Image (spheres, rainbow, N blue to C red):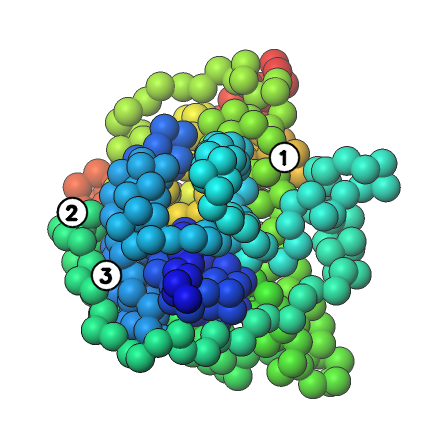
Amino acid sequence: MDRSTGLVWLRNDLRVSDNPALAAACRESDAVVALYIHESDTGIRPPGAAARWWLHHSLIDLGESLAKLGIPLIVRSGKAADVLAEVIKSESITTIHWNRRYAPAEVALDKEIKENLRQQDLAVTSHPGNVLVEPWMIETGQGKPYSVFSPFWKTLRDKQIEQPLQKPHKVGDPIKPKQIDADYRPPKWSKKFDGLWAIGEAAAHKAIDRFLEQNLEYYPEGRNFPAKDVTSRLSPHLRFGEISPRQVWHTALARTHSHHDQRAATEKFLSELAWRDFSYHQLFHREDIAKAPMQPKYSAMEWRSDEKALHAWEKGETGMPIVDAGMRQLWATGYMHNRVRMLVASLLSKNLLIDWRKGENWFWDCLVDGDMANNPASWQWVAGSGLDAAPYFRIFNPATQGERFDAAGDYVREWVPEIKALPDKWIHNPSAAPKDVLKAAGIALGTTYPRAIVDLKESRERALEAQARL
Ligand SMILES: Cc1cc2nc3c(=O)[nH]c(=O)nc-3n(C[C@H](O)[C@H](O)[C@H](O)COP(=O)(O)OP(=O)(O)OC[C@H]3O[C@@H](n4cnc5c(N)ncnc54)[C@H](O)[C@@H]3O)c2cc1C
């Protein structure tokens, strides 16, 4: 009898446990081959540069785990349909499995590929693996997609989230992992991330274990304070599917004791995880959210063109310490704390009135967790064009936000060391500090540290007027 060989096409699901596509292939076939494609299809957004660094290491880790199960991981570049055709032929594949993805262009491509393969009498099955609840499985009382988070969360919370699947059994003797193709290397500058992060499936599970043991109880309050660093740091692991959202969900619930405070902390954490699903809900149901404002009237927004200000923002040289700290943290580590992401995005899209898509693109290239859904949805939330966006009049003041969420200036002093000698009173607003205070701290504004590039009060009025004209 002929041996059957199944193919798993991996995309944002670089894990062996709770991987429905991999589990099905292992169940059905005598042998399994795994494939990752660096896709060059039009409309498929390639990962940004920092995320590519993560991806490269994640694929190496995954290749090793798969090899232990007797499954080779093939990594190729090109148009998905062409690469699939080649691999199907060379490996004599009879069945194909993948976990679904949700951006409109991805859905369209997968549908086309599925139909073509089925016409060639190949068995193709797609599975749910990357969200808690698939975008079409959750709808309002009127049968419409949700546009507001709170009722979305209430509905999701009442759903039974499926239990994660176990790691599949070996399909063959362990093999030597294949060499990962060198033609899609991360950029040289991402070398600086080496040693900062632990990448891969085991590291993702360690991250959640550490978070639940050490930080969960401080999470509801502490998550707003960038210097406290009490959040889970799971975002890049979730971005590449090294851990599934339902593994995170059920692990958090299983570790929660009946103590009231702990239950409340878990609920808060799960609701933040649900924001990720809400972003995917929007990604699936709307036109390309990285390009089109979700509220159409925002297409008429009169954005300013100011390359100098954009560059100062990108480099962390705006003269607003908490913004500069965030942008430098991003550049140095590929990550930025959520509170600070909101502040830098608000400064760019509101005070500087620069098109949020420019900021979204910069984040996309610099974040190790740059996510198809979370990044554009969060940018639109801050800029005001999202469906459940921050109200248009909410324009964060970086100085007062800094005083509130980094009162001792620890976060700013870590990332903007040239102003660290300033007293706490002025650390978030050096441009307003008296001359003698600046001198004593060794700061010459405009030379050792920039003057604030924008007047917060005036630019706030300008942003409100621009929004009022829509
Ligand atoms: C302008 C802007 C851009 C963003 N871009 C991204 C992005 O590209 N990728 C990304 O994963 N997140 C993005 N976020 C959301 C959020 O900042 C990060 O998910 C969070 O900081 C990751 O840190 P953590 O894993 O320690 O979060 P935790 O607080 O520990 O949360 C656990 C998980 O829940 C999800 N989550 C938490 N907060 C949010 C949120 N506000 N929106 C959506 N999901 C959330 C994430 O998957 C996160 O890993 C962005 C936020 C803003 C304001």
**Relative to 459, is 196 above or below?**
below
Can you give x and y, in whole percent of width and height, for residue 442 in the image?
Answer: 19, 55
- Residue type highlighted by circle 3: Phe
User: Which residue is at 71% across, 76% downward?
Assistant: 263
Question: Residue 37: where, in percent of width, then height?
Answer: 32, 47
Q: CA distance from mark 3 to mark 1?
A: 35 Å
Look at label 2 and name its amino acid.
Answer: Asp
**Looking at this rendering, what residue extends furthest in the front direction?**
1
Which image quadrant: the N terminus? bottom left
Q: Badge 3, how many Cα within 10 Å: few under 14, some, many 20+?
A: some
Residue drawn at (14%, 52%), measured in percent from left and top? 182
Is residue 216 among the parts visible in the rendering?
no
Residue annotated with mark 1: 285
- Residue found at the very far right of the displayed protein: 141
Q: Quadrant of residue 259?
A: bottom right
The residue where tag 2 is placed is 183
As rendered, which of 196 and 384 lies closer to the eye?
196
Residue at left offset 18%, top offset 54%: 181
Q: Secondary structure at mark 2?
A: helix
Between residues 463 and 420, which one lies in front from this camera angle?
A: 463
Left or right for 120, reference 377: left
Q: In the image, is residue 351 above or below residue 297? A: below
SS for dot 3? helix
CB at disc 1 and ligand 1 closer than 8 Å? no
Residue designated by label 3: 193
Q: Residues within 10 Å of mark 2 (few under 14, many from 20)?
A: few
Distance in Å between CA atoms under marks 3 and 2: 20 Å
Q: Residue at x 40, y 74 (%)?
A: 171
For ligand 1, tell me if the residue under mark 2 lies within 8 Å: no
Foreground tag (2 vs 1): 2
Contact, CB < 8 Å: mark 2 with mark 1? no
